[in-house]
Amino acid sequence: MKKNTHPFHDLKGERRDQLLITCDQHGKPNGFATRKMCHQADGKTHLAFMAFVYDEKGNVWMTKRGKQKSLWAGFWDASTISHVLPGESTERAAERRGKEELGIEVNFRKVGSFYYFAKFNGDCENEFCYVLVGKTMDVPHPNPVEIEDIKKIPARSLVSEVINQTSIYTPWLRFAIRKVVLPEKV
């Protein structure tokens, strides 16, 4: 993978003091907490999203999480994944991270949501997660701080790919493919 510092990229990486929106297990906001508080030990439930970027042929861009990520570094994931920040919509959050992580502009729409909890080395993900899809003809330029590698998978093969190789994919991606029906094309 060619390393690229596209002008959209945020090269600062994770911010442990970043303020996140806390919520109940149904996604109803109920306050704020730092990223650190949301992920330490059993954490606090907070709003998150995962977005799948499709190309014009019905392939989905998948990303391998960078080595410096604090949770599930080196695991394969959806196209872009992050948190909804105070004052922004879920769609706007996905658009922001599409620029920061992949260097592309994409309009996203929600296709589902789910709650999950997963432990990792004493920390956790405790999230109400929205699932979004969008389409672009642009080729992603991965942010080297966030993404180690990228690949395309035909959308029609995504579920079987993840089910057959669960050990290389993030737990939230495994939850998403069981809870949300992704379209074959966008």
Image: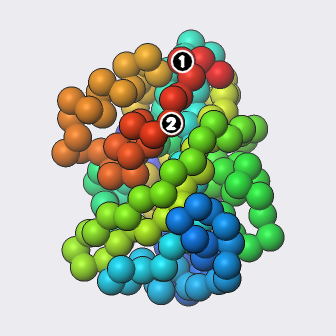
Tell me, yes or no, if residue 64 can be seen here.
Answer: no
* Quarter of the image where the N terminus is located: top left
Tell me, yes or no, if residue 180 can be seen here.
Answer: yes
* Secondary element at tag 1: loop
Q: Residue extending furthest top? A: 57
Mark 2 touches mark 1? (CB < 8 Å): no
Residue 14, percent from left and from top: 49, 73
Residue 36, percent from left and from top: 46, 84
Q: Which mark is residue 180?
A: 2
Count how many numbered circles sit on residues in the image.
2
* Quarter of the image where the C terminus is located: top right
In the image, what residue occupies the spot 66% across and 28% down? 135
Q: Residue 111 or 50: which is nearer the viewer?
A: 111
In the image, what residue occupies the spot 54% across and 55% down? 129
Residue 148, percent from left and from top: 37, 50
Residue 174, percent from left and from top: 34, 43
* Secondary element at tag 2: loop
Q: Which mark is residue 149?
A: none
